[in-house]
Image: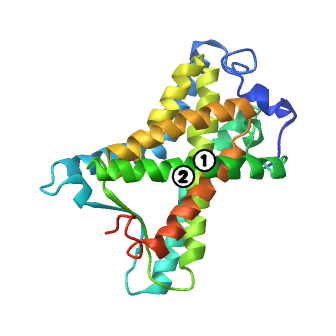
Amino acid sequence: MGEPGAAEESSTAAVGGAGEAGTAGVGGLASRRVLGREVWLVLALSLGASGVAALISFTGVLTSAKPISGQTAVIVGSRAPGRPWLDLAWQIFAVVTALVPVALVGHFLLRGGESLRTIGFDLRERVRDLGRGTAVAAVIGGAGLGFYLLAYASGANLTVDPAQLPDHWWRIPILIAVAAQNAVLEEVIVLGYLNRRLDQLGWSVGRSTAASALLRGSYHLYQGVGGFAGNVVMGVIFCYLYRRWGRVMPLVVAHTVIDIVALVGATYLIGKVGWLPGS
C-alpha cells in the first residue's frame, strides 16, 4: 500500500503512547468522538463481534449437561462435507473475507495521513522480523501448549481440535492460509490499530494494553477459561513487544508460526499420541 508523505514518521514514534506523536491529528472533542466511533465500528465488524460470539458459545458450554473437558472446539472444519471442490471454495472465501477488516483499517489510517506502515505492517525489516517472530513463536508456542494441557487436565478447557478437514490435496495449503489470515487479522487490528487509536484518544499504556489483551482473550473464550486466560497473557506480552520494537510484523510472523504448528501438527498427531487430547 502506498504511503502519503505525512506517514514518514518512524514506526517507533507511531506506538509511542499518548505523547505528541500518539495524539497527532486528533484535535478537539468532535475528532475524538469520530475516532472512537471508528474503533467501535471496526471491532463490531471483526474481532469484537467474534468476542461476543465466543461468549455466547461458552454460555452454551456451561449450560450443557456435559463437562467442559468433554466438549470439543473445532477451529477449522469442513464447510461442505463430501463435496471437496465446494468445500475448497468456501474455505478460500472465508479466508479472503476475514481479511476485509484489515483493508478497512488500512483505509482509515490512510485517511488520517498514516498507513499500515505506521504500525509496522510492511516488509522493510524482513530478516529481523522473521528472526524475532520465530524466537517469540518458540517461546510462546511451547508455553501455550503446556498451559492448554494444564487447563484441560483441570477441567477448565474444552478439547481443542484445531483442524477437521478432509484428506484432500488442499488441506495443508488451506491450514497455512488460515494460520496467516488469523495472524494478520488479529495482530493488525488488536495489536497495531487498536493500540494506535487508543494512544491517540489519550489512553495510558496500561489501559491500552489491558483493553487489547482482554479483547484477545474474549474471542478465544469458546475454547474455555484456559483459552481465555492464556490469550490474555499472550496479549500482554505481545503489546509489550510491539511497543518495544515499534512494529507489528514480528508478532504477525510469530502468530503465523504458532498457528501453523498447531493446525498442521494436530492434523497428524491427534489420535496418535497419548498426551494430546483428541475428540
Q: Do labels 1 and 2 touch, CB within 8 Å? A: yes
Point out residue 136 in the picture as x, y percentages from the top left corner: 65, 46
Relative to 202, is 241 above or below?
A: below
SS at badge 1 = helix
> Residue under circle 1?
139
Q: How many marks?
A: 2
> Residue under circle 2?
142
Residue 100 visible in the current orientation: no
Mark 2 neighbour density, 10 Å: few (under 14) some (14–19) many (20 or more):
few
Relative to 201, is 55 above or below?
A: below
Point out residue 278 in the picture as x, y percentages from the top left corner: 34, 68
User: Which residue appears at 46% of the width and 79% of the height?
Assistant: 87
What's the image's color scheme?
rainbow
- Amino acid carrying mark 2 in the image: Gly
Q: Depth check: give the residue in front, 106 or 274.
A: 274
Indicate the quadrant containing the C terminus: top left, top right, bottom left or bottom right.
Answer: bottom left
Q: How far apart are the alpha carbons under marks 1 and 2?
A: 6 Å
Relative to 26, is 196 above or below?
A: below
SS at badge 2 = helix
Please give left or right for residue 174 compared with residue 71 in the image: right
Residue lying farthest to the left in this orientation: 65
Q: Depth check: give the residue in front, 193 or 143.
A: 143
Please give left or right for residue 233 compared with residue 193 in the image: left
User: Which residue appears at 16% of the width and 57% of the height?
Assistant: 66
Residue lying farthest to the top in this orientation: 28
User: Which residue appears at 58% of the width and 35% of the height?
Assistant: 237
Mark 1 neighbour density, 10 Å: few (under 14) some (14–19) many (20 or more):
few
Please give left or right for residue 50 compared with residue 104 in the image: left
- Amino acid carrying mark 1 in the image: Val
Relative to 21, is 76 above or below?
A: below
User: Which residue appears at 77% of the width and 41% of the height?
Assistant: 117
